[in-house]
Image: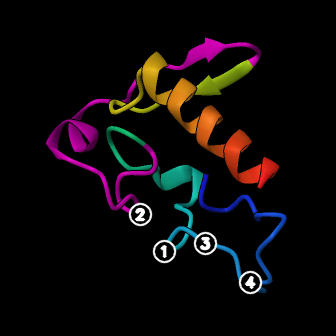
Amino acid sequence: MGTIPKLDDDTETLVQIDGSMPRLAAMPQGCRFHPRCPHAFERCRADAPPLELENAAGVACWLWTPDETARRAAAFAEDASD
């Protein structure tokens, strides 16, 4: 979500995920993003989260909940309307 630019912000750089993408032949165990994710915890290193589909959008994260999606969508809509 941090990579989505805000309409009222003149920032020229976007938030990016640190590190580099793994080679397709050397994917990490567990969540594919855990080596680069600042929110990763032990389960991320051991188990890949299932892909959850909601409204034609997908998310695969152990920290995701439907409430989180609604909260972020509301915050994004509020930022866009300001």
Q: Which of the marked residues, 2 or 3, is nearer the chain's N terminus?
A: 3
| In the image, farthest residue toward the right | 7
Residue under numbered circle 3: 15
- Pointer 3: residues within 10 angstroms few (<14), some, or many (20+)? few
Q: Secondary structure at mark 1?
A: loop
Q: Nearer the viewer, mark 2 or mark 3?
A: 3
- Residue 47 magenta-drawn? yes
- Residue 46 magenta-drawn? yes
Tell me: 6 left or right of 53.
Answer: right
Q: Amino acid at mark 2?
A: Arg
Q: CA distance from mark 2 to mark 3?
A: 13 Å
Can you give x and y, in whole percent of width and height, for residue 71 in the image? Answer: 51, 31
Residue under numbered circle 4: 11
**Residue 36: assigned label:** 2
- Nearest the viewer among 9 and 53 is 9
Q: Amino acid at mark 4?
A: Thr
Q: CA distance from mark 1 to mark 4?
A: 19 Å
Which quadrant is the C terminus positioned in? bottom right
Q: Quadrant of residue 14?
A: bottom right
Q: Secondary structure at mark 2?
A: loop
**Residue 48: assigned label:** none
- Nearest the viewer among 35 and 76 is 76
Q: Secondary structure at mark 4?
A: loop
Can you give x and y, in whole percent of width and height, for residue 2 in the image? Answer: 60, 60
Picture residue at 33% right of the left edge, 42% below the top = 29
Can you give x and y, in whole percent of width and height, for residue 78 in the image? Answer: 69, 44
Relative to 13, residue 54 above or below: above
Residue under numbered circle 1: 18
